[in-house]
Image (tube, grey):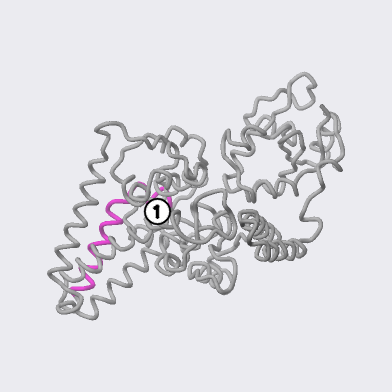
Amino acid sequence: MPAKSKMQKGDIWWTNATFFVGMHIVGLVGVVWLSPWSTLKRQTLWLFFGSWQLASFGITLGYHRLWSHKGYTARLPLRIVLAVMGSLGFQGSIKWWVLRHRLHHRFTDDPEHDPYAASRGLLFSHMGWIFCKPKYDRMALIEKGDLERDPVVRFQHRHYIPIALFFGLVCPTAIGATWGDAMGGYIWGGVIARLVIWHCTFCINSLAHWEGLQPYSRDMSARGDLVLAVLTNGEGNHNFHAFPQDFRNGPYPLDWDPTKWVIWILHKYTPFVTRIRVTSEPDILKARARILDIDAADLGSTEDAKKEALRKKAAELRALVPPQEWGIPEEKLETWGRKQLQSYVENGRKKVVLIDGCVVDVTSYMKDHPGGSGIMSKYLAIPATIETFHDSGVDIGEPDSDEQPLKDATSAFHGGLNNHSSAAKERLKVLRVARMAT
């Protein structure tokens, strides 16, 4: 989906707007007609709750943490179930949702390129974007190969509308009919449950960027809020999205994150989740310490005691980080020429990028890169072998040519492709292995 969110005059997404408003009208009439306090059957109320929660976990377990961020690896049966559950969210197909979400992460808060940018206001980020028919000019930058290779994603994308309507409206109606309340099943198990999952999800786009705590990052507007976490099965711990590839949204035991618990149980006790991705504790500690330093710096001169306490806590957190997790200081890095770089790459079959004049070894990191390995492969300074050179599609001359300039990723790292977070910059320091001779 291409990324220009500015709506031109008359550029209204009429199909979206009509369906969205129509569902709310039907829901409002239904609530008045079948009041939960008088005429609604208890079984139908439970049907509503179950339908809402299935949709909620379909979005959080499937659309978001599995397909958007690849926080864990799921076998085919689980992916099929999650595709059906996600369809209950009435938020588009997996492919449609994931590509826009990845675009949102690449350009978070950018009023032009973030599809539901919080910087455009609370109403727009919550549901105003639904009425716009935008053009996403930077969608070509977003990795989609993994989605196109997944047969579950392909099938669901082709047949999304009948799948969503059948499981989201027809099934609740049929279930309600088994106890003589087909209309209640349609209204509450179908329409109202769809409205609730819509607005709970949309609150992450809006309220979770508006109010709450920021213990891990101030690079973006995302915040953490317990109430939103409860309503969204853990998604409300939104500031931890400074580490989007993590299968958790709350890294600690007391963080309310049922989605994390389900993934962990499936990984621990079933064959359906084969791998989970976890941010290293040193990266989390460094992020927390950095925020405490920012908080201390923001305090006035009359709050010296509080300032000192924050700095002391930050120092305590840093002391828990192993020395090797800080990386080699830039001034102590070896200085390499082109031949040394060439030897390092070819003899060790390494993959490196050049950023800020430093050689960064991304061999083991590429598979965990939040934006996908494909985008990083385009910026390799020298492909690891002649074969990978020709396969990469990166035109930097023959690997042993001293005449061609080396590919440099500095501008891409510092905003050309993405404004990388402080956490990413800390990880960069750990991956540096040398400086390039000027």
The 10 Å Cα crowd at callout 1, few under 14, some 14 to 19, many 20 or more, is many
Residue 35 as seen in the image, left or right of residue 328: left
Residue at 85% in and 33% down: 336
Name which residue lies at 58% across and 33% down. Answer: 416
Rendered location of residue 33, percent (x, y) = 12, 69
Direction front: furthest residue: 302
Q: Residue at x 27, y 53 (%)?
A: 162
Is residue 366 visible in the rendered image? The answer is: yes
- Taking depth in this image into account, of 379 and 254 the one nearest to the observer is 254
Report the quarter where the C terminus lies.
top right
Q: Quadrant of residue 305?
A: bottom right
Q: Is residue 357 above or below residue 158?
A: above
For the stretch drawn in magenta, what is the main secondary structure? helix
**Where residue 49 sits: x, y (%)?**
31, 72
User: Does the magenta-highlighted stretch encompass residue 187?
Assistant: no
Q: Which residue is mark 1?
A: 206
Q: Residue 396: percent from the left, percent from the top?
A: 69, 25
As shown in the figure, which amino acid type bears the numbered disc 1? Ser
Secondary structure type for disc 1: loop
Indicate whether 39 appears above or below 312. Answer: below
Residue 15 spot, x, y in % from top left: 23, 43
Q: Which residues are magenta?
A: 153-177
Per the image, is 170 magenta?
yes
Nearer to the camera, 230 or 348: 230
The N terminus lies in quadrant:
top left
